[in-house]
Image (cartoon, rainbow, N blue to C red):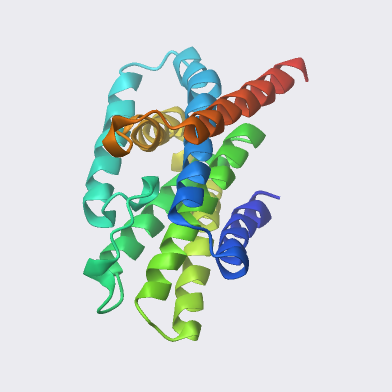
Amino acid sequence: MNFIALIVSVVFGVLLVVSFKPSTKVIQLFLSFSGAYLLSITVLHLLPEVFEAHKENIGVYILLGILIQTILEFFSKGAEHGHVHLHPFTNGIPWLLFISLSLHAFLEGIPLGTVDSNLLLWAIVVHKIPITIVLFIFLIETKLPKSTTYIFMSIFALMSPLGLLISKETSVFSIYHTEITAIIIGIFLHIATAILFESTKNHQFNVRKFIAVLLGFFIAFISTQWLVMH
């Protein structure tokens, strides 16, 4: 189920671009929703989980996750939260962007191999769709052959399942599950807050973005409450 959901999220993102060619405004709304959902699941579910484990210095691992994502974004130019800078990549394959986003996707899949959490899975799935849209648009803008573009997207689609598989089959990931989850929390916090709190154009209040954020918060809250009840 986890493997299929992670791959389908990428396929869905590609189909959205091919079928509807979403505008930058639509992508930003999708990112706002996914950022709010991701932040809510992190605060309401993941953070209590790692602190309930009573591991020493767990906050250090969260900070490490923030640092790792900061480094990755140096290469991806902030594509994880919708900063679409096409011009630097139009003359060839955007290797740094692709590698950084793929590594990000790989890291996301690791916690899923050591814990059965539908909330974490769906947080990653919701987050991967807009990232897929951004990456696919980047690759289209490079004017690469379609076959090459789809090969890159196929590799990207397999990165999170690969992280899941490796962590599932390697005992060290089970031993340090809490610490690894804390690192992922740091990554999620960095991305979600960047999406939600960066200034909008001319610092104006964006009603549509605010509604998308509220919807993300609401669905995440309902999801966590459903988990508690069941």
Q: Which residue is depicted at the point 54% across and 27% down?
A: 41
Q: Which residue is depicted at the point 62% across and 21% down?
A: 221
- Name the side, left or right, on which 90 lies relative to 131: left
- Name the side, left or right, on which 98 lies relative to 215: left
Q: Which residue is depicted at the point 54% across and 65% down?
A: 21
Instruction: Assign the C terminus to one quadrant of the image.
Output: top right
Instruction: Give coordinates of residue 101: x percent, y percent.
Output: 37, 56
Instruction: Give coordinates of residue 95: x percent, y percent.
Output: 29, 69
- Name the side, left or right, on which 126 lies relative to 62: right
Residue 86, placed above or below residue 1: below
Instruction: Give coordinates of residue 45: x percent, y percent.
Output: 55, 22
* Figure disc tally: 0
- Name the side, left or right, on which 51 lies relative to 113: left
Residue 158, placed above or below residue 110: below
Residue 110 in view (yes/no): no
Instruction: Give coordinates of residue 57: x percent, y percent.
Output: 30, 18
Residue at the limit of the structure toward the right, as seen here: 230
Splitting the image into 4 quarters, where does residue 226 fall?
top right
Q: Which residue is depicted at the point 45% across and 28% down?
A: 178
Say which of 80 and 86 sits in front.
Answer: 86
Residue 58 in view (yes/no): yes
